[in-house]
Amino acid sequence: MNYKIAFIQLTRIGDVIQTFMAAKQLKVENPNLELTLISRTRFASQLNFLLQIMMKSLHYP
């Protein structure tokens, strides 16, 4: 069964990085997970190259 998880991270860039690390571990343990990140552009866009590795979709409100 495929599960979908959305991470909502609207604060600092360091929090986005920590969220990425948690998502990475989840993906290692559950390869069928579909991960989505919802974050502010000013924080996550700087890490877009890194986030695309792990997330199926990225949303910047």
Image (cartoon, rainbow, N blue to C red):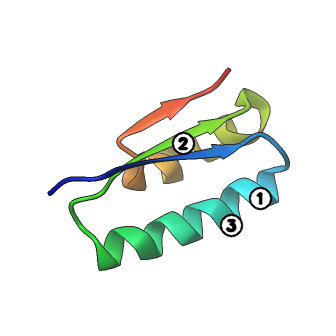
Image mark for residue 37: 2
Q: Is residue 13 above or below residue 25?
A: above
Cα–Cα span, label 3 and label 1 = 5 Å
Q: Which SS class for mark 3?
A: helix
Mark 2 or mark 3, which is nearer the start of the sequence?
3
Cα–Cα span, label 2 and label 1 = 12 Å
For the point 70% across and 54% down, the residue is: 16
Q: Residues within 10 Å of mark 3 (few under 14, many from 20)?
A: few
Q: Which SS class for mark 2?
A: strand
Q: Quadrant of residue 46?
A: top right
* Amino acid, disc 2: Leu
Q: How far from the left and from the top, in percent, is residue 1?
A: 14, 57
For the point 20% across and 53% down, the residue is: 2
Q: How far from the left and from the top, in percent, is residue 44?
A: 67, 41
Mark 1 or mark 2, which is nearer the start of the sequence?
1
Q: Is residue 18 above or below residue 59?
A: below
Q: Nearer the viewer, residue 61 or 47?
A: 61
In contact (CB < 8 Å): disc 2 and disc 1: no
Per the image, the residue denoted by label 3 is: 18
In contact (CB < 8 Å): disc 3 and disc 1: yes
Per the image, the residue denoted by label 1 is: 15
